[in-house]
Image: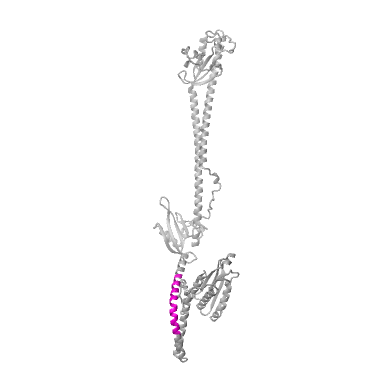
Amino acid sequence: MNALKTFKPGAGRRGTMGMYTPPIMVIGSALILLVVVVVLAANNLNREKDYMSRLLMEKGASLIKAFEAGARTGMMSMQWGERQVQQLLEELSRQQDILYITVTDENGKILADSDPARIGARYPAGNSPVSPAPSFGEKWRITNARGVRAFEVYRYFRPFSNHATGMPAMGCGGSWCSPGNYVQKKQSIFLGFDVASFEVAMNEDIRNTVIVSSILILLGFTGFFTLFLTQGYWATKRQLQDTSAVVDEVVANMPVGLIITGRHGRIVVLNSAAEAMLGIAFDDARGKPCESILPPGLIEVLALLKHEERILDREIACEVSGRTPVPMSITAAAIRNNDGEPIGHVLILYDLAEIKQLREAVRQKEKLATIGNLAAGIAHEIRNPLSSIKGMATYFRNRFTEGSEEKKTASIMVGEVDRLNRAISELLEFARPFDMNPDATDINRILDHSVRLIRNDAQSKGVRIKLVKAENLPAVSVDSDRFLQCLLNLYINGIQAMGEGGDLLIRSFADDDKWIKVGIKDTGPGILPENIKSVFDPYFTTKSAGTGLGLAIVYKIIKAHKGKIEVASRRDEGTEFIIDLPVAEEKRGKS
């Protein structure tokens, strides 16, 4: 269980990957939208211009036709002349938005005009804008012909209904309105509208089009900008999720304990290593105050952070519920935000138990090596004088009479020399490298043999031996003779510790497929806690007649087998030695 088990890397991203669009596509879409809006605006303006032009041209055509009809009617039925036609033209030009009406001959001479003063003059530039080819359809243009901007509608002037026959106009005096003049010399009529209304309408359309187009462009770019921001949001979120997934994996698989507290001193993160060290489940600790969850040693470290910025590698004995104090190295620091305000604390826990065990093993090996070198150097020098002393003591013992004090003294000297020689033999055995001959062996077979060898000694002391063997254990790779020596040493230690009467429990079992365990437990008085760590030291003994090399030799033999040995003891309840032996390689490969 780790601090972020509820989070799964990649969770929450399903469905967002499809929303991702490359930025170049967003920019391209925005440009396309801009072009489309501009084209639509231009088309709209052209359409409005065409509409207004068509409207004015139709109005002009209607007025021209009305003028023609009036002139035709007047000239045919009312005996009109030029003056009456001029009056009709002037009256017609007084309508709203009409600037002028002009009738010219084919050479541009003004025959009639809304301004009588212009009659006889030439129309601007002296050329009629009408094509010389006969055309009776209306045309238009924007012109400054009269010194003012005007929307001008023009075409051939045709006051008679039958141009082919040239039917005379009854009572029409003058030359310009005669049928013959019209047929032979085509006349033109120009009607100018005030262009201001046209331009006002166009400007209004342009303004409305610009406003609408601007709104569309603004909305479009706002949408694309929002999409771009959304793209950045999803990309940032995805990157954050990936980073979070990496952090989660790092935190979950850190070989050291990690604890993070929040602003109010509540637990936020507790990784699996910290759970194992402290025996606390993160689900039980999440969001709870540190004082109610963490051991006192860690609470003291957190209290020190109120006065110190950080704490580096402080060793404490952390009291964990239900376990012996665990040696730990603590590194802690305050977590601060960008404004420098503390928002929590981080604690990194290193379990020093294994390191201390390694240090102890190194110390033990150094001690054994030192003693071994010492033993190898002096054993030979001691043994030679001992042989001479024993020979002289034996000689004098044989010379004295039986039962005399002298003979007893000589016998004591011989016994002490033998005892000293045995100690030297053990010392030499301890110092001498072992010749190991390991072989795949059934551990239960060795236990059966060892019990047979020790049974008589146990019975003589009133000790009951109980052998408990696990079935179907894999073979172990051991030197049978050396391992049998270890077992006998441990049996003898247990029997001697119990004195008269007791139980010696010998058992074999397996915890996994890599190690086979052997336990030897007595019911003696136990070992004092302060002596536990020294039981495998050479020459350490609590017995008056012991050499202190028995357990040191056991330790050396077990280590030579690449095994482990541990001791557990309670006062007045007994002591148990647990030996771990590796499973034979060929057996392990099959499992």
Question: Of residues 344 and 465, which is closer to you in this image?
Answer: 465
Question: Of residues 422 and 72, which is closer to you in this image?
Answer: 422
Q: Residue at x 50, y 52 (%)?
A: 244
Q: Residue at x 48, y 25 (%)?
A: 200
Q: Magenta residues, as a range?
A: 365-390
Expressed as whole percent of the image width and height from the top left, the position of residue 136 reads 56, 17
91 falls in the magenta region: no
Q: Main secondary structure of the magenta part?
A: helix
Residue 16 drawn above or below residue 578: above
Expressed as whole percent of the image width and height from the top left, the position of residue 179 reads 56, 10
**Which scheme is used to colour this image of the protein?**
one colour
Question: Of residues 518 and 292, which is closer to you in this image?
Answer: 518
Expressed as whole percent of the image width and height from the top left, the position of residue 174 reads 52, 8
382 falls in the magenta region: yes
Which residue ends up furthest to the bottom in the rendered image? 401
Does residue 591 show up?
no
Residue 257 drawn above or below residue 368: above
Which residue ends up furthest to the left in the rendered image? 307
Which quadrant would the C terminus be assigned to in this image? bottom right
Residue 294 drawn above or below residue 150: below
Expressed as whole percent of the image width and height from the top left, the position of residue 577 reads 51, 72
Figure disc tally: 0
Does residue 30 show up?
yes
Locate residue 377 relative to residue 18 in the image: left or right.
left
Res. 171 image quadrant: top right
